[in-house]
Image: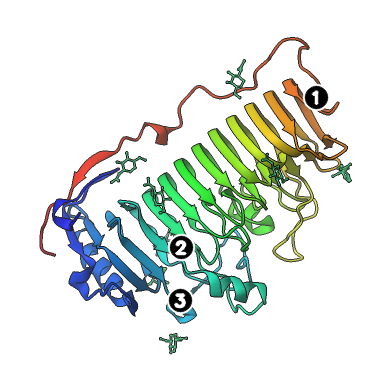
Amino acid sequence: SALEDLEYSAVSCRAYSASLDEFGGVGDGVTSNTAAFRDAVAQLSRYSDDGGGLLFVPAGRWLTGSFNLTSHFTLFLHRDAVILASQNESDYEVIEPLPSYGRGRDTEGGRYISLIFGTNLTDAIITGENGTVDGQGEPWWGKFKRGELEYTRPYLIEIMHSDGIQISNLTFLNSPSWHIHPVYSSNILIQGLTILAPVTVPNTDGINPDSCTNTRIEDCYIVSGDDCIAVKSGWDEYGIKYGMPTKQLLIRRLTCISPDSAVIALGSEMSGGIEDVRAEDIVAINSESGVRIKTAIGRGGYVKDIYVRGMTMNTMKYVFWMTGNYGSHPDEHYDPEALPVIENINYQDMVAENVTMPAQLSGIPGDQFSGICISNVTIGLATKPKKVLWNCTDVSGFASGVTPPPCELLPEKQPGTMIPCNFPAEVIPIDEVKLQRCYSRRKNV
Ligand SMILES: *[C@@H]1O[C@H](CO)[C@@H](O)[C@H](O)[C@H]1NC(C)=O
Ligand SMILES: *[C@@H]1O[C@H](CO)[C@@H](O)[C@H](O)[C@H]1NC(C)=O
Ligand SMILES: *[C@@H]1O[C@H](CO)[C@@H](O)[C@H](O)[C@H]1NC(C)=O
Ligand SMILES: *[C@@H]1O[C@H](CO)[C@@H](O)[C@H](O)[C@H]1NC(C)=O
Ligand SMILES: *[C@@H]1O[C@H](CO)[C@@H](O)[C@H](O)[C@H]1NC(C)=O
Ligand SMILES: *[C@@H]1O[C@H](CO)[C@@H](O)[C@H](O)[C@H]1NC(C)=O
Ligand SMILES: *[C@@H]1O[C@H](CO)[C@@H](O)[C@H](O)[C@H]1NC(C)=O
Ligand SMILES: *[C@@H]1O[C@H](CO)[C@@H](O)[C@H](O)[C@H]1NC(C)=O
């Protein structure tokens, strides 16, 4: 479709719209469009308080360096639009590390700004007709592996300190590092994304909600060399000090392929806390683990009130995995007395096939992971499974209707009767947000 007859669904519609080619954009795959994107956003930002602006990216291959979004703004990609991320480091400004991490994750000090970046925004939307953002991450992955990077790799999208974010109906490919990173933000809707990276490359997580409140992620298909979704809230003493949890997170209808990582990871950076996470209707194929908890002495914080129901898994190393000794500290100044609290973790209604080891559940000595509930789970083993099927240390809770039978630290609650684990009935507010039908209204800007 052309800009003139756009029709799409969004949390909010815009009064003004313009197309990237009106700002000198050239979609030939080689000309840089950094100036065109920046100019377009600057022009449309004049309408932030007057009905909002939409930037249409037409069919074509649009090479660009980093650009920022603005408030009450929509970036819309035509189905044949491909935004190609520049591979030149000088197209990414170096910005401060996140306060809740204290340093970049790849290197100490600063980090390259993300390809599409926003901070202190209200109501920002990135959507389209399944157009593509290609991170062209290959040179970054190589430089990272060889230790040649001066700063931490950029993400494809990072939105900080913002309220009201929609990212939907798009394909993201080959990010240099994480693909989608909302941080210190609230009221976030992520819908209908395809995220693909080679399964052999480092840290290409799909979606990382980080110190965010009220987030809904649904209908996504993710193939990654790292976690498909990684829920975070800051790292050791920096995350404890910043103290902003991730809470009210709903994940549904996710399909994940992650041979070396988790379908959903909680942590390992969880020092601001992670609470009230609900995941349902998840399909995992050839993944290392299901919903995994990763933490360490020094993290502090908590992971609590986690509810997972309805998972189908095929070819898994572990179905259940909790790790209390993940290690990985920002520096030597972490507090060895800062112990994470892990409690009220519920898993139910799951079927898994071709599993090497049903569960590796390792709490922290003197800091038991408690209130673990597993119900109605059937696990079929691989041809050569591990000898010990359930290995549990420093955990407590119970199981009901689980095969093969769990470890003795998770005793059968009431033998012969299925007692389901909890799943809250009340709705997370973002689940009540409805999309509007939007039509572009042509106005010169
Ligand atoms: C976006 O995807 C949803 C399903 O996830 C679909 O209902 C909707 O029509 C799509 N919108 C566009 C503009 O393609
Ligand atoms: C984008 O925003 C960041 C953070 O405010 C700022 O450092 C950077 O200069 C901005 N980039 C552009 C091109 O305006
Ligand atoms: C990267 O961009 C800088 C600044 O625009 C330029 O001087 C340099 O030649 C570019 N490097 C490559 C490899 O294109
Ligand atoms: C953005 O919001 C954060 C958190 O509220 C605040 O600390 C920061 O000063 C704001 N930055 C700008 C540029 O307004
Ligand atoms: C979007 O594009 C990706 C990549 O081409 C494709 O795998 C996916 O099926 C498409 N999604 C929809 C809803 O058409
Ligand atoms: C079972 O998993 C192994 C890897 O652990 C894989 O090679 C094999 O193809 C899987 N078999 C089936 C039937 O999926
Ligand atoms: C057990 O889980 C399966 C899905 O794996 C579901 O179809 C079934 O209804 C559940 N049974 C009970 C008693 O909840
Ligand atoms: C069981 O877990 C403990 C603690 O993580 C570990 O030290 C031990 O090697 C594991 N045993 C087996 C048989 O996997």
Q: Badge 3, how many Cα within 10 Å: few under 14, some, many 20+? A: some
Residue at numbered disc 3: 93
Dot 1 or dot 2, earlier in sequence: 2
Residue 335 locus on image (x, y percent)? 76, 56
Amino acid type of disc 2? Leu
Q: Which of pointers 1 and 3 lies earlier in the amino acid sequence?
A: 3
Relative to 12, 67 lies left or right: right
In screen coordinates, is 392 left or right of 5? right
At x 48% / y 46%, what residue is drawn?
Answer: 221
> Distance between the Cα atoms at labels 1 and 3?
54 Å
Quadrant position of ligand 4: bottom left
Residue at image point 66% right, 72% down = 145
- Which residue is at the front of the view, 60 or 281? 60
Q: For residue 373, which quarter of the picture?
A: top right
Q: Position of residue 196 (x, y in %)?
A: 50, 56
**Viewer-proximal residue, 319 or 94?**
319
Q: Is residue 47 above or below residue 321?
A: below
Q: Secondary structure at mark 3?
A: loop
Give x and y (percent) for residue 238.
64, 59
Q: Quadrant of the N terminus?
A: bottom left
State whether residue 183 appears in this view. no
SS label for mark 1:
loop
Q: Is mark 1 within 8 Å of ligand 8?
A: no
Single out the mark in the foreground, 3 or 2: 2
Report the residue marked by disc 1.
405
Residue 68 placement, left or right of 306: left
User: Mark 3: which amino acid?
Assistant: Glu
Q: Earlier in the sequence, mark 3 or mark 2?
A: 3
